[in-house]
Image: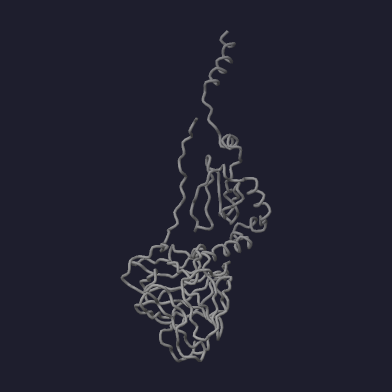
Amino acid sequence: MSNAKTPLLLVALLAFTPLVPTPSLLAALLQHEPLVNSPDTQPHRTRLILKDGSYQIVMSYKLVGNIVRYVSAERGGAIEDIPASLVDFEATKRWEARHANPSAAADSTQAPAIDPELLKEEADRASLTPEIAPDLRLQTEDSVLALDTFRGTPELVPLAQTDSDLNRNTAHNVLRAAINPLSASHQIVQIKGESSLVQLHVESPVIYLRIGDEVTPPTGTALTVDTHGATANAPSASAGGSPDSRYVIVRADIRVGARVLASFRINFLGGVQRQEDVVETTTELLPGGHWMKITPSQPLSFGEYALMEVISDKEVNLGVWDFGIHPVAPENKDAIKPEPRRRPSLERRTQTHP
């Protein structure tokens, strides 16, 4: 009789014994296999593809509970988490299979394989917003940015073009004016107001001009043009800054309620003879060809200035970017400050019931 009761007792004990889930069971509950790199596989760049069609470039990743933990290849090896429900595991595996490198995987002593396609994509994406100071990057929302320093912190200050009421992200327009390169100095541009809304705090600001903007013809009335006999062509739109143009910084003459820019001798630019109130610049096209770096050849003293584009040896762009140099001015309203990259954290959400 005792022997007959023994199987029943075992069945009862097993029925009330808590089930300890194994890793494979956990994965089955989550409806995904554990995505863990095997110990003999070196980290390598790959794509963690999301269900919305986007992806993260990662060095490795694994499933931890209901999140995927990965090492970002774009953010210096930062360890980041993302909900597993957002990841398209099948698409990730398919992409990995198509771009696997068997020869590199077979020899673990070799450096990790780097997909040239990924490298090109990373370089192209980084060139749109290059880092020009620690944690400070150029922004695609702006066309012209000046590198300033306020209270010891580098900042980027957007410069608006004065010939247009357009938003600054599309403000690169060309209002051509033909100027006699041998004529005497005379007024060519008058800007409203005795000072610019942008006041920089350093005497040698570096200016970054985005190349290839898509713009519309200028329609604003921010300046008055008087070419004194020079011919002004009809306003025309420019596809952003041109690497073929030259750029100079012209000091403005302050009048009552206005700032005046005088013409200068274009044919003297680059020569040994300096021109009063004209500061020449050096230009450098940044990697990727999306931005041009413009550096004044000499420090700028206290006063009001404008960046002017010289289109040819007889033509200038009357659409200028004005700013002032004022070391003790308040901080600029739209200044872009450094943003240290932080590890993203998952927000704890509580499920609500109707």
Task: Please name the residue shown 54% across and 57% down the image.
Answer: 73
When the figure is inspected, residue 24 is found, relative to residue 207, above or below; the finding is above
In the figure, 133 relative to 248: above or below? above
Toward the viewer: 248 or 163?
A: 163
**278 to 22, vertically: above or below:** below
| Residue extending furthest toward the left | 328
**How was the colour assigned to the protein in this rendering?**
one colour
Number of numbered tags placed on the structure image: 0
Q: In the image, residue 200 lies at what x, y percent?
A: 38, 71
For the N terminus, give its image quadrant.
top right
- Answer with left or right where residue 28 lies relative to residue 198: right
The residue nearer to you, when weighing 162 against 222, is 222
Q: Position of residue 128 (x, y in %)?
A: 54, 65
Position of 182 relative to 234 (above/below): below
User: Residue 8 placed where, x, y %?
Assistant: 58, 14
Q: Nearer the viewer, residue 62 or 162?
A: 162
Q: Quadrant of residue 32?
A: top right
- Image quadrant in which you'd find residue 6: top right
Q: Give the percent coordinates (x, y) of residue 42.
A: 58, 54
Q: Residue furthest top?
A: 1
